[in-house]
Image: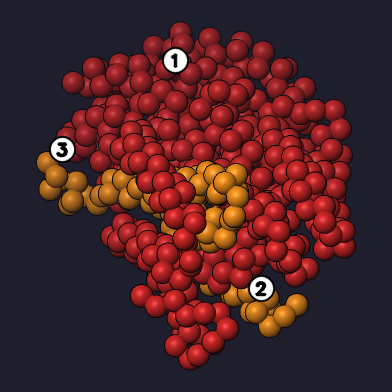
Amino acid sequence: MTTVPEASLGLAEIILAIGVPLLLSLGVLYGIKMMSKVKTAASGNRLSALCMLLAIIYVFMRTDLSGSLVYIILGLAIGTLISIVITLRVKMIQMPQMVGLLNGLGGLASALAAILTLLSGETQSGFSLVTSGLALAVGALTFSGSMVAAGKLQGLLPQKPKVYAGHHTITALMALAMLVLIALLPVVPGYNGMFCLLLGVLGLLFGYIFAIRVGGADMPITISLLNSSSGVAAGIAGMALGDILLVSVGGIVGASGLLLTQIMCRSMNRTLSAVLFGRAPAAAKPEQAQETKASEAAVEMPESAPADPVDWLIEAQSIIIIPGYGMALSQAQEQVKTLTDLLEAKGKDVRFAIHPVAGRMPGHMNVLLAEVDVPYEKLYEMETINPDFSSTDLAIVIGANDVVNPAANTAEGTPIYGMPVLSAEDARRLMILNFDTKPGYAGVHNPLYDGASNIHLMLGDAKGSLEQLIAGLG
Amino acid sequence: MTGLEGVLVLVFLVAAVLGYKLIKAVPSLLHTPLMSGMNALSGITILGMITVTAFSQSVLARLVGMLGIIAAVINVVAGFGVTDRMLRMFKGGKEAVGKGS
């Protein structure tokens, strides 16, 4: 272990300063590459983790820690201890809020790093000042935004979008104010403390107001967007500190979050700005009230119909199960697995159709089904399985609504119009296990509830409905 | 902007483009673990946190640094931990049978 003084920039020092971060960045990138295949994904994640550990060791070796060593070691120890508890305790069902919470902590750390840089009392270049200011603002908004998102997912905050008067204007004004403050940082020296306070408070408020008006099905988009912003915050903090590794990994994370956000938006047929500024859900409100009444009246028909869902299961040869957020809410994935096993034991072909935005985070359904040992080969993406519905005997919708709503293809002017949906209605028969017949998050009436003779509704908690089916089969 | 600052901005952009390309290849099946893995990586800010804490002179600054380090460590360690737990659940048909459950 040698610490070379900054002044003597020998070849060895340059290799150490550029080469090691480069190598570790490549390691992280290779780890991500390994995450594109199920078989190598776990190793890829571990490779990324190893690179991170090496990076921390590298920083330890190159920095004079003297006076702060106790604080740093203590911080590392406490953080690791809490992490172990979290890792072992968290349930898969809590994963969306967990990701939100952890993401917020990353943002908080970036914001604190920026504050300490700004208040260090050392003279900073304009570049360092501006990037510190940016990292502070983005870090703070990531923190509060993620906390609000996690609070909503955990049920601590109301799930419904909360819209203030002039919401859009307030958001825009705050963003503008932050940009002005950041631009002023290098121009007005000597007031860094005040700038920190203003930027921190504005950032926190911005994150809050941005996340509070997002609800339900827009959550996956918000979570992945906040994921992106935490990466950006880290990357910009790295610029302020002149740390190449921080910059490169921050860039990778920022891009990944943005890409996921894009994918989610495309799957919902919504533009990012519509999600952020919430045009669509608000527009759906008046229609929702009216349509709900209509559907409630219609529901009585199928309930009096004598169709026995168990018979339908027995008569079907090919079955496609469509899980949605309702399955997660009632924690019915065990029952789904049991039903699948029973049906397969009777020689039936059972597959799963996964809509890209089913649930509350990207890939939510896949994780829940993996937890109960449903082999991933049975999970099909929307584009792959949609043509197969017409040749399928029975489709079973479990706690999904908007993602199977045929109105998306026909009802022009509604928020979900044009959103790609699973063509469940093409199956010969359709069984819907939903809590009630209220419209989904998008607030658009689902014509599948109108009582067609080949559609059977089982209302109530998905877990209970599934247990009924399992008992009937067994 | 000095040379180093230019390099930093360049590295940020190159890393973003490379990351974007690699992540595009990840199937939606793995999007949750991918996201939580990326989330853990965003805790890379711990490097910055350690550096600024090392340079801090006052006790208050060092305490703030410690708080930041705790936050970042949780982001990193718990992030990788839960991702690992999730990824170990993904099993193919044969493997699931082999487990006997």
Mark 1 → mark 3, Cα distance in angstroms: 29 Å
Find numbered disc 2 in the image and state the secondary structure of the residue it sits on. helix
Q: Which residue type does callout 2 highlight?
A: Val
Judging by the rendered image, the residue that carries numbered circle 3 is B101
Name which residue type carries label 3: Ser
User: Residue B27: where, in percent of width, then height?
Assistant: 43, 57
Kindly identify which residue carries mark 1: A460
| Apparent side of residue A446 relative to residue A318 in the rendered image (left or right) | right
The 10 Å Cα crowd at callout 1, few under 14, some 14 to 19, many 20 or more, is some
Q: Which residue is mark 2?
A: B9
Q: Please say if A299 is above or below A161.
A: above
Colour of chain A in the image: red
Residue A423: where, in percent of width, then height? Answer: 51, 41
Chain letter, colour orange:
B
Residue drawn at x 73%, y 17% as measured from the top left: A290
Name the quadrant containing residue A220. top right
Secondary structure state at the residue bearing disc 3: loop
Is residue A261 shown above or below A404? below
- The spot of residue A301 in percent (x, y) is 52, 12
For the N terminus of chain A, give its image quadrant.
bottom left
Q: Chain of mark 1?
A: A
Q: Quadrant of residue B13 in the image?
A: bottom right
